[in-house]
Image (cartoon, rainbow, N blue to C red):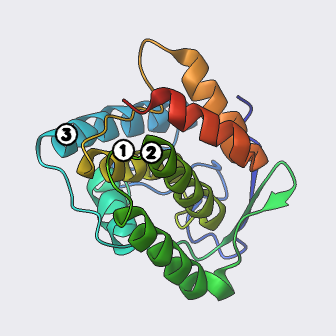
Amino acid sequence: MKNDYSYLDLDGIYTDSKTGVLYNLGGITDRDALTFAETATTTKRTNELRLNPVNISDSSALFILHDHLFQDIYSWAGKRRTVEISKSGKQFFPLSHFDNALSYIDSLIIEYKGISQSEKEQCSHKLTEILDSVNYLHPFREGNGRTQREFIRLLAWEKGWILDLNPPDNADAYERYMAGTINGDVEMLADLILDCLR
C-alpha cells in the first residue's frame, strides 16, 4: 500500500529537514532502519499488551496505548500531534477541533459498552464507527494504524471477542483494513470487522 502522507511541519518539530527522517530516541537517520526499529519495538510492546491489556474506559486509552507502543522510539509517544496531516489529498481531523472529536469517540465507546456481547452484528457495527472516527482523528504524528488496531482489539476483547485486523496468516484482511481506512469506506471496514470478529 503506497504511503503518500503529507505533513505541514514547517518548524521541523518531528522531522529532520536534511534526512526527512523522524527524530527518534535512537538517533537513526535512515528511513528503512527506523522502520525496522519501529517494527521490532512495537511488536515487543504489542505482545506485552496481550499479556497485560489496558482497559479502554474512554479515548484517553489511545494516548496510553500509543505511549506504550512507541515509548522506545519517540520522545513524543502518547502525545497529540501538533501538525496537520493528509493522505491521498484527504485531510485528517484538524487540530483545532481535537477535543470535540475525542468527546464524540467517548460517546461511541459508551454506546458500545451498552451493547450485549451476544449481539455480534451490533458490536461489529459500533466497533466500525469507533475505528472510522479514531482513524479520521489520526491523533499522532506516526503510529496511528498500530494504535487504533490495538485500541479496537482491546475493545473487542473486553466483550469476549477476538479481533485481529493484521493477522500474520491473512494479508487480505490487512489490505482491506488499509483500503477501508484510507478511503473512509465504512462499509468495507464493517464487513472486515464482522468477518474477523470471533
Residue 160 vertical position relative to residue 80 in the rendered view, above or below:
above
Residue type marked 2 = Arg
Using the image, tell me which numbered label, if any, was put on residue 153: 1
Q: Position of residue 21 (x, y in %)?
A: 58, 48
33 to the left or right of 63: right
Q: Residue furthest top?
A: 169
- Mark 3 or 2 closer to N-term? 3
- Give the foreground label among 1 and 2: 1
Q: In the image as oriented, which residue stretches furthest toward the right?
A: 89
Quadrant of res 71 = bottom left
Residue 13 placement (x, y as % from top left): 57, 72
Side of 45 where 184 appears, left or right: right
Q: Which residue is mark 2?
A: 149
The answer to whether the residue labelled 1 contacts the one labelled 2, judged by CB atoms less than 8 Å apart, is yes
Q: Amino acid at mark 3?
A: Arg
Q: Residue at x 60, y 18 (%)?
A: 172
Separation of marks 3 and 2 at Cα, in angstroms: 13 Å
Residue 106, horizontal then vertical, whole percent: 45, 76
Circles 1 and 3: CB atoms closer than 8 Å: no
State the separation of the CA atoms marked 1 and 2.
6 Å
- The picture quadrant where one finds residue 110 is bottom left
Mark pair 1, 3: CA separation: 10 Å
Residue underneath mark 3: 50
- The residue at 42%/22% (across/down) is 167
Q: Please tell me whether residue 101 is drawn above or below residue 2 in the rendered image.
A: below
For the residue pair 107 and 180, the one nearer the viewer reads as 107
Which of the two labelled residues, at mark 1 and mark 3, occupies the earlier sequence position?
3
- Tag 2, which secondary structure? helix
Cβ–Cβ under 8 Å for marks 3 and 2: no
